[in-house]
Amino acid sequence: MTRPRRPGRDDDPDRLYTLTGGRSRSDSDAFDLVTLVVSECEPTPGMQSEHVTILRMCQLPTAVVEIAAGLGLPVSIVRIMLSDLLDTGRISARHPRTARVADRLPDPEILEQVLVGLRNL
Amino acid sequence: MSPSSRPTAVALLISLAVTGSLCLWAVVAAPDSVRTALAWGAGATAVVLSAAVAVAVQARANAGRLRARLASETQRFTGEISRLVSASAAEGQRFTAETARIKSAAAAETARLRSAVEAETARLTAQAAAETERLTAETERLRARATRSETERSAAVAACANAAGRMQALATSMLADLRDMEHRHSAEDVLGDLLHLDHRTAQAGRLADSIAVLTGARSGRRWAKPIVMESILRGAMGRISGYQRVRLHSTSDVAVAGHAAEGVMHALAELLDNAANFSPPTAEVHVYVEEVPAGIVLTVEDSGLVMSDVQLRRAERAVSATDQDLTGLSGTRLGLAVVGRLARKHGLTVSFRPSARGGTGALMMLPQELLTRAPVPAPEPARPVSEPEPTHGTAPAGTGTAAVAPDARRPQHAPATAGPATPAPADSTPADSPAAETTGHLPRFGESGLPKRPRGRTLAAAEARAHAHGDGDGAATPRPRTSDPKEQAARFSSFRQAVRPNTPHPEEGNTR
């Protein structure tokens, strides 16, 4: 049994450019692969189905890359759609605090010990 | 004195003289006593005698004259009669001769005419034969020419159909390649170019589809699954150059059966293309979807040129299901002819009317036979993206129920989707079920907003339904072959039921 959608498999009639109205780059750079997205409202009738799906997926914080995988769409396309949703206030985006995470990285020595311990397992 | 009275006078004189002298003699000779009486008597007798002689002479002369006259008259009569007889005889002869002459002349004329008629007839017959021969030759020549041109035409059409089919195949594979590349290249520049190429290829594919439709080749790709209305609209929109001006208004969750989806998309694309081409380059084209009892009405409205009554009628005729020959085809206006062909093939009804937006509105009705409700979403327990493909047998318990769920859920689901407030049937799926609450176990939604069923699940469900007893997931666990013919037949029929309506063989996928 195959997966329902293999990325890149051409089994849907709608082309990617119709999803974004022909745009290939997003206006905002608010999104990268790991940006967490939370939906702010319920989907409404008449919405583009991808938007509906995104809003449904993002009831809990979800990373952009996961959304892209869930939709089976390229990340760039998903980012454009997320920008649209962000502009209309339907979602909010939150970036993981990578900078402070880097600050809080454990001591390299501890990490080395852990690595040694793992190898000894 | 007349000549006839002259003898009378002479006779009178002579008798007077004779009798006078006799009287005189007598008187002289007679005694004196009787002389006087005698003189009177003799004188009177002499006068009377003379008168009688004169009268007799006169009468005799008259008689002779009359006799002569009678004789002459008689002779004249005879002459006249003989003249008349001879004249009549001559006349009769002349008449006979004339009659004979006329007769002969008539006979001659008749003969001449007859011969002339015969000659004319012969000439005409010969001419007609020659003409017939010429016409036969001409007909033969024309027939040969018609046959040849028919052969040429069918050969040309076949060549066009073949080329169009190959173009279609090429376009389809190019689209697949492009989609593959769009997923592989994440750089925005590259993606933009790929999208551009994608759009161009889709338009080329539509042209190839048009030629294929007009030449009667097989239709384009056949979708293996029902295509939801949103994808139909977007698929149609993506094939025209001005797709960015198209605005879709659809809340319908109806899907079009896979075998007709391509035709519907193509016809709609042609209507959209017409609408976009015949309206100002900045005007929007609106597409509305309306569910009616007979099916679905797609309305394409532009705000461009208003079609006159004549143009509307012409357009209606072009798309009507009766007029299907290629003679009215012009090189640049293929669209409506294509729509007409597709309408006849799939039973679509297309009509035109002036639009409330100021332009023209095109209505296309899809009959109920082409429509299915969106395939009932199996509440598929989501798998992490990277998880290898699980089988039914090894899946968690939820998967096992999902295999039979579609059929069990269908009746409950249909009324739920009829409401206008539920655009996607996913609303009724337990999206908020525990399985969906973690991001790692999202249900897999398609682009249509619907959870998607994996391929082959229908087969499994049908198997499970056919063998209502506890075979469990019969599709996944191979069963020992049975030798019971009835069971084999049942198994085969359930296989056919499972394969035919919705899901083709998994390996076929959406091949054309």
Image (cartoon, coloured by chain):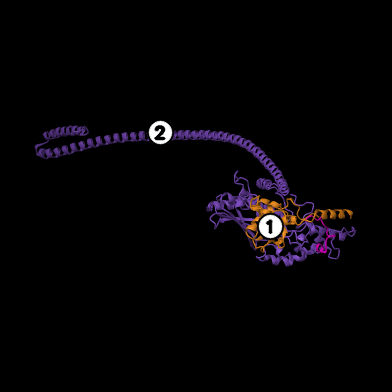
Chain colours: A orange, B purple
Residue B397 lies in the magenta-colored region: yes
Residue to which mark 1 is pinned? A50
Tell me the magenta residue range.
B385-400
Q: CB of mark 2 within 8 Å of CB of mark 1?
A: no
In percent of width and height, residue B431 lies at 73, 64
Q: Which chain does the residue under circle 2 lie in?
A: B
Tell me the number on the disc at residue B86.
Answer: 2
> Could you tell whether B178 is left or right of B357 in the image?
right
Which SS class for mark 1?
helix
* Badge 2: residue crowd in 10 Å (few <14, some 14–19, many ≥20): few
In percent of width and height, residue A89 lies at 63, 60
Identify the main secondary structure in magenta.
loop
Near-viewer residue (B478 or B55): B478
Q: Which chain does the residue under circle 1 lie in?
A: A
Near-viewer residue (B351 or B49): B351
Tell me the number on the disc at residue B415.
Answer: none
Amino acid type shown at disc 1: Glu
Near-viewer residue (B506 or B147): B506
Which SS class for mark 2?
helix
Amino acid type shown at disc 2: Ser
In percent of width and height, residue A95 lies at 70, 57
**Quadrant occupied by the C terminus of chain A:** bottom right
* Badge 1: residue crowd in 10 Å (few <14, some 14–19, many ≥20): many
Near-viewer residue (B37 or B74): B74
Camera sees residue B211: no
